[in-house]
Image (cartoon, rainbow, N blue to C red):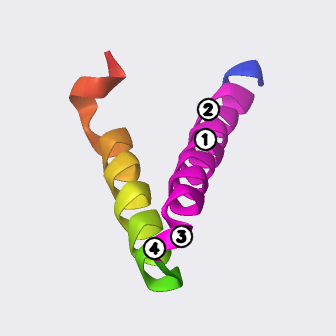
Amino acid sequence: MDIVWIIILVPLIYFATVILISTIQAMMTRGKGKRVAKETFKETFWHFFFELLNPFNWI
């Protein structure tokens, strides 16, 4: 049962970390405008999210 919790918790922790990093970066660019901040959040989020799907990063 412990392995099931690990399988569930690792993606959740990674997902929360990606959202946190994206939010911080968007807040740093908020002075340039709300639209720029949203675009920065999207770009950062998808960049880190797809890094999770890259099997070479799992090693």
Identified by mark 1, the residue type is Thr
Q: Say the numbered circle drawn on residue 32.
A: 4
Pointer 3 or 2: first along the chain = 2
Q: Residue at x 40, y 51 (%)?
A: 49
- Region in magenta: 4-32
Q: Say the numbered circle drawn on residue 10.
A: 2
Badge 4 local density, few (<14 within 10 Å), some, or many (20+)? few
In the picture of the structure, the residue carrying the numbered disc 3 is 31
Pointer 1 or 2: first along the chain = 2
Whether the magenta-drawn stretch holds residue 24 is answered as yes
Horizontal side of residue 32 vs 21, given as left or right: left
Q: Secondary structure at mark 2?
A: helix
Horizontal side of residue 3 vs 33, given as left or right: right
Q: Residue at x 69, y 31 (%)?
A: 4
Alpha-carbon span between mark 4 and mark 1: 24 Å
Mark 3 or mark 2, whichever is nearer to me = 3
